[in-house]
Image: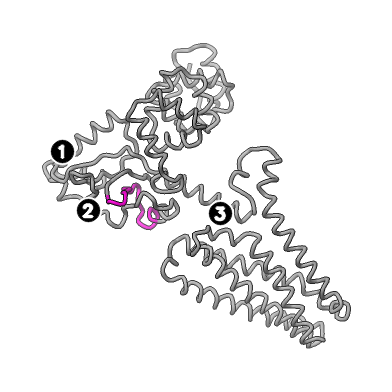
Amino acid sequence: MKLRRRTPVKSIKRLLKSNSQEIESALDRLQAVDLAEIWHHFNTEERVGLFESISRDFQSEVFEKLDLEYQKELLDNLNTSQISQTLNSMAPDDRADLFAKLPEYKAESLLSVMKRTEARDVRDLLEYEEHTAGGKMTTDFVTLSPEMTAREALAKIQDSVDKEHQRNIYAVYSVDSSGHLLAGILLQKLIASDPDVKIKDITRTVDRIKINEKEDQERVANIFAHYDLLSAPVVDDDDKLVGVITIDDIVDVIHEELNEDIAIKAGTEVLDFEPKSILKSVKTRWLWLMTSFAGGLAAAVIIGIFEGTLAEVAALAVFIPIIMDMGGNVGVQSSTVVVRRLALNRAEHNWHEIASGELLSGLLMSAGFGILLWIAANYRYTSSIAWASGLGIALALAISTVLGVFLPIFFHKHNIDPAISTGPLITTAIDVIGLGVYFLLAIWIVL
């Protein structure tokens, strides 16, 4: 019986029920990620049977791709031998990520059935903060002596892959007798080198791409993007090689950071993108919405304070929406530009250049829209109202630009995620400040 590519679920279910001997080879023809994607179509009994039908060499790869709930389900239903084999064969970084999400009692129980070396590796990796280079690296890497020949190096790599299930080897690194990082070489170049050449003669410095184990994951992703890396060495404070980060981990980081930025802009949390209860969804959004609600109330209070002014000159109310909307939009634009440039580390030592450039752009736009609104208002209303509305929107946009530029920089300097300033915080502040400025100008010019 052959597994059809277009309907794998039905075919797999049929093979499971018939206890066919073909199921292992049929499953092995699938990609691990494809098998993980259809995992939810099976019930618990079928999922356990499915996993047991996968070849042993393929089990850990599939297990790594499963959602946490399905990983936990398998750990609760497999026998000790199967659990041990699966956990021992996992990539160290994926295994550490799993253990970080398990209750402590469960983690300790699983560590007790693993090989001593792998269990110690898990404990070592769990010492790192989740969003640092150490939390993302793998300890599956190959080290070479600078005195080795290319032939000897390739033999060591081949032996390591054979015994330790190495995956995603893009580069290897030479170290001294104490484990200090010396240099690196791409695997492709090593393969193409003369078999008798010494490693020290074909390696290159890695000073620009080596990453400290405490480095934030976003900074790591920027290094990968800047140097077009597939992998990078991770070192401790003594410059000893402790791990390697590969591009597949960085892709995950990029997804995490993107989801986080989108969530902040939407006034919610990353967890809100995942299926969960309605009450939890409301809870995650409540704080941000309360900020906007409070800002709206504050704006209403300001309008109430200047109610007499509006009663005398009703035309002033016509321009309130455009001043509030434009102020919020300009502030968010400015802050988004600054946040992005901070994230790209272009403002690490020259934030004043970014601030001055963005301020100049914002002030030019403020003047431009002030003139446009003055022309529009002058056509329909009196000259005094035209001046009040034109100056009002110009000042509101200028203030919005200043907040949009300096709030992200302030947060960045105080080690707070600057993306937070692009949410309701800026628009709420501008609604209140912009209206206040507009009404004060109206009183001064019109009345």
Q: Going 43% across and 62% down the picture, which residue do you hit?
A: 345
Dot 3: few (<14), some (14–19), or many (≥20) neighbours within 10 Å?
A: many
Of the two numbered discs 2 and 1 on the same chain, state the one appearing first in sequence. 1
Where is residue 263 shown, x and y percent of the image?
60, 51
Q: Are the residues tagged 2 and 1 within 8 Å (C-beta)?
A: no
Which of pointers 2 and 1 indicates the residue nearer the eye? 2
Residue at the farthest left position: 196
Where is residue 23 shown, x and y percent of the image?
46, 18
Q: Give amino acid for label 1.
A: Arg
- 163 vs 278, left or right, is left
Residue that mark 1 sits on? 151
Q: Give amino acid for label 3.
A: Asp
Task: Work out how far the residue at label 3 is from the one at label 2, CA to CA, in angstroms.
Answer: 36 Å
Residue that mark 3 sits on? 261
Residue 204: assigned label: 2
> In this picture, which residue range is highlighted in magenta?
223-239
